[in-house]
Amino acid sequence: MDPQRLVHMANQIGAFFSAEPDRAVALNGIAGHLKRFWDPRMRSQILACVDEHGGEGLTDLVAEAIRRHRDTLAT
Amino acid sequence: MYSVRETDYGTPARLSERLVTLEIDGVEVSVPEGTSVMRAATQAGYSIPKLCATDMLESFGSCRLCLVEIEGRKGYPASCTTLVSAGMQVRTQSPALAKLRRNVMELYISDHPLDCLTCPANGNCELQDMAGVVGLREVRYGYDGANHLTAEKDQSNPYFTFDPTKCIVCSRCVRACEEVQGTYALTVDGRGFASMISPSAKESFFDSECVSCGACVQACPTATLMEKSIIDHGQPERSVVTTCAYCGVGCSFRAEMQGTQVVRMVPNKDGKANHGHSCVKGRFAWGYATHPDRIIKPMIRSRITDPWKEVTWNEAIAYAAAEFKRIQAKHGRGAVGGITSSRCTNEETYLVQKLVRAAFGNNNVDTCARVCHSPTGYGLKQTLGESAGTQNFDSVEQADVIMVIGANPTEGHPVFASQLKRRLREGAKLIIVDPRTIELVRQPHVQASHHLKLLPGTNVAVINALAHVVVTEGLTKEDYVRERCDLREYEKWKSFISQPRNSPEAMEPITGVPAAEVRAAARLYAGAHNAAIYYGLGVTEHSQGSTMVIGIANLAMATGNLGRSGVGVNPLRGQNNVQGSCDMGSFPHELPGYRHVSDAAVRGLFESEWHVSLDAEPGLRIPNMLDAALDGSFRGLYVQGEDIAQSDPNTQHVTDALGALECLVVQDLFLNETARFAHVFLPGSSFLEKNGTFTNAERRISPVRKVMPPLSGMEDWEVTAALSNALGYPMHYDHPAQIMDEIARLTPTFTGVNYAKLERLGSIQWPCNDKAPEGTPVMHVEQFVRGKGKFILSEYIPTDERATWEYPLLMTTGRVLSQYNVGAQTRRTENNRWHHEDVLEIHPHDAEQRGVREGDWVGVRSRAGETVLRATLTERVQPGVVYTTFHFPWSGANVVTTENSDWATNCPEYKVTAVQVSRVMQPSEWQKDYARFSQVQDRLLQERERTQV
């Protein structure tokens, strides 16, 4: 799938959770949403975006959420 | 008039718990206080003659036929306008009454054509019946006096005629238009003998304000207002109760039949969603079911450039199954999927998702609710605990303040709109939140207290501003929240929403709504005893659709407006079975009953029943399927009853993806836009040709009953089962009732649902289980389904789709009354007379700047594509905003919309597209390509290899 589109979608999710004052809760929320609603092939592509391209295009919050919860998202 | 065999009680039922006992013809009768003598008599088994009375309308007392004698009272009071009182003694028959009634009938008949034998109402005419009942044997006045027998018949309406020669001026039609429909299109013109029924200001019915709901035709006691289908075919010989296949109101109808031919659809008085009312679509626009465009033989082809070949059902099913298996063997289990339809029954959608999960072995199943109400499912589940509206429709009758957000009920949900307008006429206040001046803002006897005419894309800013006022002005219901909601989340939300950046003043530059108007609306909503919110796709089809649903739930919880009648959060579902298709597990992350696929216990339940191992990972959603088709990881798709090539955004993207598939199987009534890209076509069956159930916007499960055999020989559920069997996963059902039994075994909210109970109760609102064996009209009564209601932060985040120098206008989309969704059904009816093409609404100021005049062709260009429509200049839209509908494929409304979507659900942002509009002289390039492609596909269909199967 188009990586740019996935990055955009992930950032939209991140923007929603960015209102959360507790950063850990926001990170959990982002990763949890990706885990519960994204097909594994989409998750593996967004993980690849972080691993292979340093999370280019992702907001800091989303990139951190993916890195911190990579094990959950990978399985 | 009413369907044959229905009892007409003459006046409406009263709901008082206090009973009044009286005596009618020597028999003691007890009825609720406020009941008319006429109704009491009818309930007791007596039949008082009547003409101007009918139980859908308040009594009028004009015909003087229903006179009775009451002990101790002078004269002969009309039984329709006389209410019962304790100890009253009524006589319905006496020589004096008989004489009076005969005299009345004599006068009526003296000015009525005596063509009963050739009259279309013959056999079902109240005037004829009354002449018989009163024993009319002569008309002493003769027939040569002044009369109306030369009046001209109005045949302008495509569905019914108005023959004033047969009119007795009982005013039932006028009152039906006022009381039932609320349109006020009819009046009695003139006085005394010159009185005539007139649509609007002596216009024809077609040119008048009439919305063709049929209420007047239903109310008419003679052949004055008569369905053309009855004129053509004659009176029905039987009727079958079923459920309309149009919008999410889910009206109950009696399909009136001659053999296997429908001759009339009459709204069912006992229908709990519609109470005997209807709209132009359900009442009249059912001719598509037997339209010549129906394809009733299965077809296959290897490539979409090949002509179709008609084959047997077995061949088609075997071919489709072999293709899916081939693709999976080569590209993996996840390379195929399916789409269920909100136009199909619960049982059908359940089977399609079961086929995908059990036979395909993945969770790549989605439904058209993806592109309409998926944010409702997400937002209400997160905040309240259940992905459904909270009320029954009747709840509106107890609402004191009604807020309509991003919905246009008079066009999209007309029967509910009539109920809502009735409540407004009783004094309830109305708040409209909509970028357009929809009809409800101001119409006869309806005037919104506040119209928050926001800019498209700023819903969340408005709902936050409303909540800000409620919180900062101390208008929250603290006791309610303390008892029922998660207080930690509530405090967090209060802190968030109280911030000055959420105030109406701070939001005004963003929303375009004056702060004072927002403050006043917030005070009105929060100050009401009962305040209810009704919303539509203007809420959900945004990049922040889910956030907006959350914001609505936050506001309702904070003001204590959930958990009782008269309040609530009510999504108005677009199609007939949006709620049901979602309930049935059509989303890729949820099994039936909204339970996530990762829940091992839930999965185990289904695995045990289905005897198969299920995938624990969510599958692809429709937009993801299309993206995956273009990258080659998704190659086969089974689409039942949907037309994503017309309904989904960015048409070019959708058709590119469909063109990339190796096997597209479409099951539908017609060779729709999507089917032009298909390799296998499986003929679908209309709602008249199958059994099953639909679930409407109020969670009401209603029966769909087969009134004619399926034209193709198979009902849709049978086709899905056959495909599953061919794929190697056995499905064996003899009747949809068995499918519902399986759903009930697996779904806690459906535990108590079965066909026998549906037969007994007529319809059932889920949850229906041990706790609520006859269903649940209002949800979250004692506590929220999730336990404590959860306030969630709803930060306003502007959409990326913004007006720019290149695309300075914002386009938003919607529907009209006469057409339905992609128009596959209504375009094949006379409804086209009202709306035969999609047009672009543009404000006169924007039009003038562009040199655009009424009726000009204009190019509408966005970053996704360009189409050409005719312009209509109107101040319904505000400057900077244009509007169109998407009912006709060649209009290409979705060529322009983009794939920008809701953050949580991927629901497309149909409601905001930045566009430029300019005068043009020819169709767009897309339209030219579309015309060429359509021509080729039409030829391939015409040249199909026909077989005698």
Image: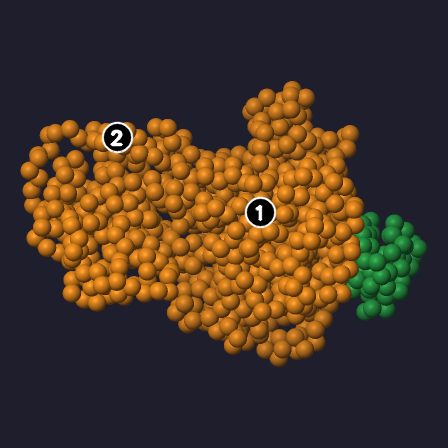
Chain colours: A green, B orange
The residue that disc 1 covers is B404
Q: Residue at x 19, y 45 (%)?
A: B64
Q: Which of the marked residues, 2 or 1, is nearer the chain's N terminus?
A: 2
Marks 2 and 1: which is nearer the front?
2
**x and y, in percent, of residue B767 in the image:** 54, 69
The total of numbered circles placed on residues is: 2
**x and y, in percent, of residue B712 in the image:** 45, 57
Which kind of residue does numbered mark 1 sit on?
Val
Label 1: element kind: strand
Label 2: element kind: loop
Would residue B849 be visible to someone looking at this image?
yes
As displayed, is residue B108 above or below residue B698?
Answer: above
**x and y, in percent, of residue B206 in the image:** 39, 33
B520 or B720, which is in the foreground? B520
How far apart are the two marked residues, 2 and 1, measured between alpha carbons?
A: 40 Å
- Mark 1 nearby-residue class (10 Å; few <14, some 14–19, many ≥20): many
The residue that disc 2 covers is B191
